[in-house]
Image: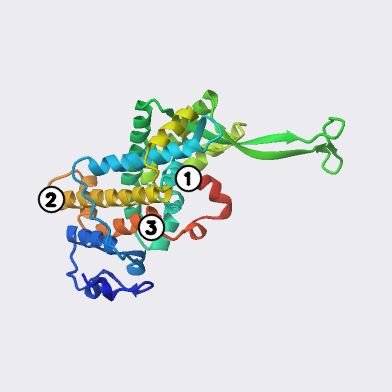
Amino acid sequence: MEIKNLKEGQVIKNYKELCEILKIKPRNGKGRILNHKEFDRHFSYDKDGHKYIITSIHKVPKDRIDNRSNGNNSIFSDDIEHLILNMLSESKDDTVTIARGQLYKALSMCNENYLLGRSNINKLSEIIEIPQSSIYDFYDYNSSKLKNTIERNLKRLRNKALITWKNTTTVAVTEVEIEYNELGEPIFDKKTKSIRYKTKTVHRLADKFEEKLILKYEKEVLEEMDVDTIQKVFLIGKWKYFKKQVENKLRENNTNIDYYYDTYTITFNNEDVKLHLEKLDRNDIQDIKNNINHNMIESIKKSTMRRHDKAIKECGLEQKIYKQEKFFEQEKIDYVIEQEQLTMTLISNKAPSLKNKLINRYDLNKDITI
C-alpha cells in the first residue's frame, strides 16, 4: 500500500480512485471492508458522499485489532465501565438520571448526528443522499446494539455492588412561579389585569400517575394509527407524528407535560466509585473515548457484513414476502457502502456536525434527549 502517495487535505473522488492511488486492488463485499480496515490503520479521513478527504497520515500504523475470543469485548467493556464511573464521580449527587441518547454520546458510542438524525430521517436522507429505507435499517439494528451494550455494562457494575440502576421516564413540565412584591404579596399587573408570573421548563422523573397517563395515550395513538407496536411506528417513519399526538393528548387533558423521554437512573456511593476508579489504569479519558468509538464502528461494520453475507446465501430461498424484500436490499453491495457511510456519519467522533442542517433551534432540546 503506497501511503506515500497521500497527503493531508487531499480530496479523492471515490473508492476506486483511492485504491489506484494506493496501488491496491479495489475489492467489493468483504474485501472492501478489509481494505477500509487497512485504511484506518494508516490514515484518517472524512467522507463526503463518495469522496474521501484525507485528514491525517499516521506516522506509525495502528495495530490490527484481533476480535477473536472475548479479549476485545473485555477491553471494550472495561473502557465503558471506566467512563460510566468517571461520569458518576463528577456528580455532586448520589443519583444521576440521564437520557439514553445522551449516555450513548457521553460514552462516545455515537455522535450528536445519531441523536438528531433519528428524529429527522427525511432531512438526513436529503443531506447525505442515502435512501430513507437504508437509514431506517441502520437505526433498527443499531439502536438495540447501543442499548444492549449500555445495559450489559450497567449490569456488570451492579454485579460489583457499585451501582443500582433502572429504566425510567423523564418528563419536561411547565412550572409557574408567581411574582411577589417586597411585602410578600402577589404582584397584580394592571395592564394585563392578572397576577404576574414566570414560567420555566423543569425535567424530572415521571410519577406513577404520569407514567400511566403516558401509557394510556400511547396505546390510544397506536390504535388510531392502526399499528400494534412502537417499534413499527419508527420503522414506517411516523415516530415524530406518534410522539406529537401523545404529547398533544397529555396537554389537552390538563397536564403540564410538554414532552417525555426514556432515561436511566443510576444510584451509587460516591466514595466506593472513586475508590474503584483509583484501582483502574489512569488512561487519558479522550483515549478511552476514542477506543470505544473505534470498537463501536468496527462492531457495526462486522454486523453489517454478517447481514450482507446472510442475505447473499438466503436471498433466493423461499421466504415470507417481507423477508424477501429485506434480503434483496441487504445482498446488494450498495447496502454495505451505505451502511458504512452512515456509520461514519452517525457514530464516528470525527464526523462533522449536521446540527444546523438537521433541526430548527426550537427543536434542539427535544431531539437531543431521545
Which of the numbered marks, if any, corresponds to residue 224?
A: none
Give the distance between the C-alpha atoms of the residues marked 2 and 1, in whole angstroms. Answer: 37 Å
Element class at badge 2: helix
Give the distance between the C-alpha atoms of the residues marked 3 and 1, in whole angstroms. Answer: 25 Å
Task: Sort mark 2 into few (<14), some (14-19) or many (20+) by Cα contacts within 10 Å.
Answer: few
Residue 68 placement: quadrant: top left
**Residue sitting nearer the eye, 296 or 88:** 88
**Residue sitting nearer the eye, 2 or 168:** 2
Dot 2 amino acid type: Lys
Name the residue carrying label 2. Answer: 313
- Whether residues under marks 3 and 1 lie with C-beta atoms below 8 angstroms apart, the answer is no
Q: Is residue 222 left or right of residue 213?
A: left
- Counting residues from the start of the chain, the first of labels 2 and 1 encountered is 1
Dot 3 amino acid type: Thr
Which of the numbered marks, if any, corresponds to residue 345?
A: 3
Q: Which circle, 3 or 2, is nearer the viewer?
A: 3
* Quarter the N terminus occupies: bottom left
Indicate the position of residue 348 as horizontal and vertical percent values.
37, 55
Q: For residue 228, say whether it is visible.
A: no
**Residue sitting nearer the eye, 201 or 228:** 201
Element class at badge 1: helix
Please report the residue visible at 26 percent of the width from the left and 69 percent of the height from the top.
15
Please report the residue visible at 27 percent of the width from the left and 48 percent of the height from the top.
299
- Counting residues from the start of the chain, the first of labels 3 and 2 encountered is 2
Task: Sort mark 1 into few (<14), some (14-19) or many (20+) by Cα contacts within 10 Å.
Answer: some
Dot 1 amino acid type: Tyr
Q: For residue 75, say whether it is visible.
A: yes
Name the residue carrying label 1. Answer: 241
**Residue sitting nearer the eye, 209 or 229:** 209
